[in-house]
Image: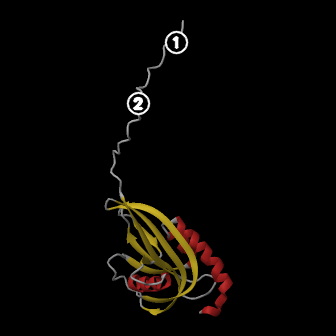
Amino acid sequence: MSSPEPPKRPVGPPRPKRRLIPRLRTVHEVSAGGLVVAEVTQEPDCLLISRFDRRNRHIWSFPKGHVEGEETWQETAVREVHEETGIEAEVLSPLGKVDFWFMADGRRIHKTVHHFLMVARGGVISDEDPEVESVEWVAWHEVRGRLAYSDERSLFKKATRLLTDLGPTQS
């Protein structure tokens, strides 16, 4: 006894695929910020901000924000640190960039964030920025455990090596 033949497919051109989900508009965003240290030593205090993310979770991260106009990434990092924390900082060295995708307001967003190692040069801590819940100087040994994002934890590890290379002469 032979097995039954499978049903034959209709002959002709393939049917066009129908999109069940409308195509989302893709937006590219660029931001800059970084890890601000109180001084250039082996294990300085670090400036972190806390805020509530899109899922209403309380998270800690480096200060950062969008590039405006013709700003360089370094200028954006310095401005955003001051706006979000009240601290005036100077860029010491690039730390790296982080690329990620997310969805918001019916758009797919590709975001690139350029991070820098920075040192505080003045100012007073302030959390008056409406996007920031709080600002704190955090002890070096606590920073890694507080950071919400694995990419920022990796940048923190890189900052450890950079601070060793820079030594205490940059303060």
Q: Which quarter of the image is occupied by the N terminus? A: top right
On-image quarter of the C terminus: bottom right
Q: Is residue 73 shown above or below 122?
A: above
Q: Determine which of the numbered discs, if any, sits on residue 56 in the image.
A: none
**Total residue callouts:** 2
- Picture quadrant where residue 8 is located: top left
Q: CA distance from mark 2 to mark 1?
A: 27 Å
State the residue at coordinates (52%, 77%).
Answer: 115
Q: Which residue is mark 1?
A: 3
Front residue of 70 and 55:
70
Contact (Cβ within 8 Å) of mark 2 with mark 1: no
* 26 with respect to 62 (left or right): left
Q: Nearer the viewer, mark 2 or mark 1?
A: 2
Tell me the quarter of the picture where residue 67 sits: bottom left
**Could you say where residue 53 lies in the image, as x and y percent from the top left?**
38, 66
Residue found 44% across the figure and 88% down from its top = 87
Say which amino acid is labelled 1.
Answer: Ser
Task: Identify the residue position indicated by label 2 in the image.
Answer: 12
Residue 23, image x and y in percent? 35, 53
The amino acid at mark 2 is: Gly
Q: Residue at x 57, y 88 (%)?
A: 39
* Residue shown at the point (48%, 16%) measured from the top left: 5
Secondary structure beneath dot 1 equals: loop
Q: Is residue 31 left or right of residue 144?
A: left
The residue carrying pointer 2 sits among few (fewer than 14), some (14 to 19) or many (20 or more) residues within 10 Å by Cα, namely few
